[in-house]
Image (tube, rainbow, N blue to C red):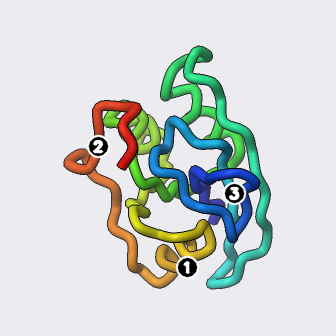
Amino acid sequence: MRIAIPSSFPGGLEAGVHGHFGHCDLYTLVDVEGAAVTRVATVPPVPHEQGGCLAAVAHLAEQGVTSLIAGGLGKRPLMGFNQAGIEVYRGTGAPTVGAAVQALLEGGLEVFSGEFTCGGGHHH
């Protein structure tokens, strides 16, 4: 499983979870096998000008992402992730990337549904 988490600089397990998917500093990618973290990396976001929100969806899909943990997310990228087969989880309130990943592995995050989406650009 490869999990992407919108993060604050400099990324990694100790980084803060950014409040909104589309306006993060970078994405921390966490590879997990069983319950163990096997790799942590970061990738820069794609500017919205290069295809809007769906460019970021394609960018993460190309990185092999299978799950996303996000605090805030618009309806359009949520639909894009669903179509790409990437599970999206609601990570509001997680203090760090590592805590968000641990919560997901323990079954403590709910699937991100349309009722939680925002109009875009608003921080949660």
- Residue 109 versus residue 41 in the image, above or below: below
> Which residue is drawn at the image coordinates 76% and 51% (left, top)?
42
Q: CA distance from mark 3 to mark 1?
A: 14 Å
In depth, the one of 85 and 51 nearer the eye is 51
Where, quadrant-wise, is the N terminus in this rendering?
bottom right
Q: Identify residue type, mark 1.
A: Gln
Question: Which label number is shown at residue 102?
Answer: 1
Q: Position of residue 16 (x, y in %)?
A: 59, 61
Residue identifier under label 2:
117
Q: Identify residue type, mark 2.
A: Thr
Disc 3 packing (10 Å; few <14; some 14–19; many ≥20):
many
Helix, strand or loop status at disc 1: helix
Q: Earlier in the sequence, mark 3 or mark 1?
A: 3
Residue identifier under label 3:
29
> Which residue is drawn at the image coordinates 51% and 21% (left, top)?
52
Q: Earlier in the sequence, mark 3 or mark 2?
A: 3
Do labels 3 and 1 touch, CB within 8 Å? no
Q: Position of residue 83 (x, y in %)?
A: 42, 39
> Which residue is drawn at the image coordinates 46% and 45% (left, top)?
20
Q: CA distance from mark 1 to mark 2?
A: 23 Å
Helix, strand or loop status at disc 2: loop
